[in-house]
Structure formats: C-alpha cells, structure tokens
Amino acid sequence: MPREKKAEYDEEALTRFVGNLLMLSGAVLVVPLPLLLIVDKQERLINTTWIVYVAVIIGGVIYANTGNRFKKRR
C-alpha cells in the first residue's frame, strides 16, 4: 500500500480490532472443546462451531470494511 494511502488509516485502531477479532475467533473454536466430552451429538456441535467461526470472521471483515471506521479523523 502506498504511504499516502497508508497515512489515511488509524493503524492502532485497526490492529486492535484485528487482534480482538482473532481472539474472538480463537475462543469460538476453543470454548466448545470440553463440551465434546459431554454432548452426544458431537458432529452437530462441531458443525455449529465452524458455522459460528465463519460467521464471526465474515462479520468482522464486513464491519471493518464498511463505514470508514478506521480512517483518521482530521
């Protein structure tokens, strides 16, 4: 990305958002693991977990790319 274009964005806010998105997506995959020992329908739990994971990632990308949220205010 050219420096002029890069200077338009608030890097700190963007990196904070991406870090939070990665932590949330990791938690979506890790939190259901103990439930695998308890739940009878493990395949359904695994599929639901992956659907929620994909929804979080897609939702995060859409949120980040709409509304000029990470552009610097002048």
Image (cartoon, rainbow, N blue to C red):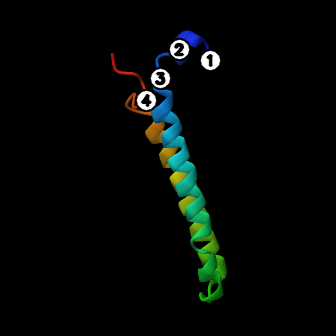
Q: Is residue 68 above or below residue 5?
A: below
Dot 1 or dot 4: first in sequence order is: 1
Dot 4 or dot 2: first in sequence order is: 2
Q: CA distance from mark 1 to mark 2?
A: 7 Å
Answer yes or no: do the residues labelled 1 and 4 have beta carbons within 8 Å? no
Q: Which residue is mark 3?
A: 9
Q: Mark 3 falls on what kind of element?
A: loop
Q: Residue at position x 65%, y 87% from top? A: 37
Q: Is residue 5 above or below residue 38?
A: above
Q: Which mark is residue 70?
A: 4
Q: Residue at position x 40%, y 27% from top? A: 68
Answer yes or no: do the residues labelled 3 and 2 have beta carbons within 8 Å? yes
Dot 3 or dot 4: first in sequence order is: 3
Answer yes or no: do the residues labelled 3 and 4 have beta carbons within 8 Å? yes
Q: CA distance from mark 1 to mark 4?
A: 15 Å
Q: CA distance from mark 4 to mark 2?
A: 12 Å
Q: CA distance from mark 3 to mark 2?
A: 8 Å
Q: Residue at position x 53%, y 62% from top? A: 52
Q: Position of residue 27 (x, y in %)?
A: 56, 63
Residue sitting farthest toward the left:
74
Q: Which residue is mark 1?
A: 1
Q: Which mark is residue 27?
A: none
Q: Is residue 10 above or below residue 26?
A: above
Label 2 packing within 10 angstroms: few (<14), some (14-19), many (20+) = few
Q: Which residue is mark 2?
A: 5
Answer yes or no: do the residues labelled 1 and 2 have beta carbons within 8 Å? yes
Indicate the amino acid at tag 1.
Met
